[in-house]
Image: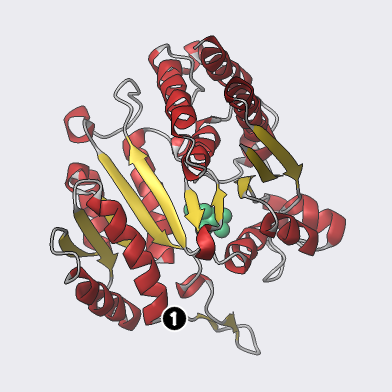
């Protein structure tokens, strides 16, 4: 199968984790005789420095013309105080918006061999839930600004019924092939947007009689995710709450470095990116965990309906963990491997099957 893939390495550890991911994809495509074309595009701090724009038009066009996008991560402390629209993160938000990638899927899977979570083991065993985070609306994209004297600031949070329905449908459908439970996380005791979420999703629930639908306030959900994570199946939530809950949920898995995500839009347009940020402190040190990016590539293979390939890649990741070929975020640092070694192990494992 032939596929055109836009590659955005981004900032910080982005180029390192992407290098390993592409190395592994090449092994897979050779083995299964696929033809993947990778087209690099720039975004984030490098794009700000080169073009004065964190998401150049050319990058967006390249993404719009590809079958999928693999995205590393963006963010650089030297641009933290740039004006609105000129931070590396703004480039990512613009891409999500322009491509209409409204449904962000973040699976939370616990690998029993990793033991770096501060949470008790008995709470963690068997945790398996997915966060469905709305990605192109809410407070992230509402009008924002400052008063003239700069002493007041605002960020509007707006949701339409249509925006809630389209991700609601994705979440209900996903639950049907899993544990058949959808938990909506909101703040309906305070926010009007959350009240709309509840109304819309409750109505949709009538068409999904087999789904056990419940609602939690965000403060309560933040506690339950740590106290009793097994009770979740599909967590459906807005942009901001989903952002916060996914970092929190990473504590269950031991490391944010492990978490992949897929962002799906209208016409099934899709981008795949790890949940973590650019981790500038680790840049160039060969210590970053490439698994978040590699597992994002595996979600991409699923999106291409290459299920054998996806399963083999996930098996290889599991083997790397079982054999303790891991970066220092998920294993004792005296016995850890480098970013490169993890990528090579996985690639070699696939080659040998
Ligand atoms: C994420 C990130 C982004 C977000 C940042 C980099 C803008 O934290 O994908 O979770 O807040 O959505
Ligand atoms: Mn985040």
Q: Is mark 1 within 8 Å of ligand 1?
A: no
The local secondary structure at tag 1 comes to loop
**Which residue shows up at 62% across the image and 22% down it?**
27
Q: Position of residue 41 (x, y in %)?
A: 76, 49
The reply to whether residue 237 is in sight is no
Relative depth, front residue between 29 and 132: 29
Q: Position of residue 44 (x, y in %)?
A: 71, 54
Residue reaching furthest to the right: 50
Marks counted in the figure total: 1
Quadrant in the rendering for residue 151: bottom right
- Using residue 78 as the reference point, say whether residue 139 is left or right of it: left
- Using residue 316 as the reference point, say whether residue 89 is left or right of it: right
Relative depth, front residue between 248 and 232: 232
Q: Which residue is mark 1?
A: 158
**Which residue shows up at 59% across the image and 40% down it?**
279
Relative depth, front residue between 346 and 269: 269
**Which residue shows up at 24% across the image and 72% down it?**
204
10 Å crowding of disc 1: few (<14), some (14-19), many (20+): some
Q: Is residue 334 above or below residue 76?
A: above
Q: Is residue 11 above or below residue 328?
A: below
Identify the coloring. Answer: secondary structure
Quadrant in the rendering for residue 58: bottom right
Relative depth, front residue between 280 and 166: 166
Q: Position of residue 97 (x, y in %)?
A: 58, 68
Q: Assign the N terminus to one quadrant of the image.
A: top right
Q: Position of residue 46 (x, y in %)?
A: 78, 50
- Using residue 195 as the reference point, say whether residue 91 is left or right of it: right
The reply to whether residue 62 is in sight is yes
Q: Is residue 306 above or below residue 321?
A: below
Q: Is residue 182 above or below residue 346?
A: below
């Amino acid at each position: 199968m032939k596929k055109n893939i836009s590659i955005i390495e981004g900032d910080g550890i982005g180029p390192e984790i992407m290098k390993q991911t592409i190395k592994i994809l090449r092994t897979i495509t050779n083995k299964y005789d696929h033809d993947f074309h990778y087209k690099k595009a720039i975004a984030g701090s490098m794009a700000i420095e080169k073009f004065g724009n964190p998401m150049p038009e050319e990058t967006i066009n390249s993404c719009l013309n590809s079958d999928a996008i693999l995205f590393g991560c963006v963010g650089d402390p030297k641009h933290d105080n740039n004006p609105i629209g000129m931070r590396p993160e703004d480039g990512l938000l613009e891409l999500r918006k322009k491509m209409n990638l409204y449904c962000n899927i973040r699976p939370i899977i616990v690998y029993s061999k990793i033991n770096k979570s501060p949470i008790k083991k008995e709470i963690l065993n068997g945790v398996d839930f997915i966060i469905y985070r709305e990605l192109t609306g809410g407070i992230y994209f509402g009008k924002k600004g400052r008063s003239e004297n700069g002493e007041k600031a605002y960020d509007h949070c707006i949701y339409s019924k249509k925006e809630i329905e389209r991700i609601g449908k994705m979440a209900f459908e996903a639950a049907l092939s899993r544990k058949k439970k959808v938990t909506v996380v909101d703040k309906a005791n305070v926010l009007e947007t959350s009240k709309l979420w509840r109304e819309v999703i409750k109505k949709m629930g009538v068409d999904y009689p087999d789904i056990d639908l419940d609602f939690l306030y965000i403060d309560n959900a933040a506690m339950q995710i740590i106290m009793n994570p097994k009770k979740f199946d599909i967590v459906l939530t807005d942009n901001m709450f989903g952002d916060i809950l996914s970092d929190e949920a990473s504590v269950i898995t031991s490391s944010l470095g492990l978490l992949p995500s897929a962002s799906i839009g209208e016409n099934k347009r899709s981008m795949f990116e790890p949940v973590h940020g650019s981790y500038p402190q680790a840049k160039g040190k060969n210590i970053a965990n490439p698994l978040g990016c590699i597992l994002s590539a595996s979600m991409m293979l699923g999106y291409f309906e290459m299920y054998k390939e996806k399963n083999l890649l996930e098996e290889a990741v599991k083997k790397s963990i079982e054999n303790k070929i891991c970066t220092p975020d998920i294993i004792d640092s005296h016995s850890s491997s480098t970013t490169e070694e993890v990528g090579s192990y996985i690639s070699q494992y696939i080659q040998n099957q």
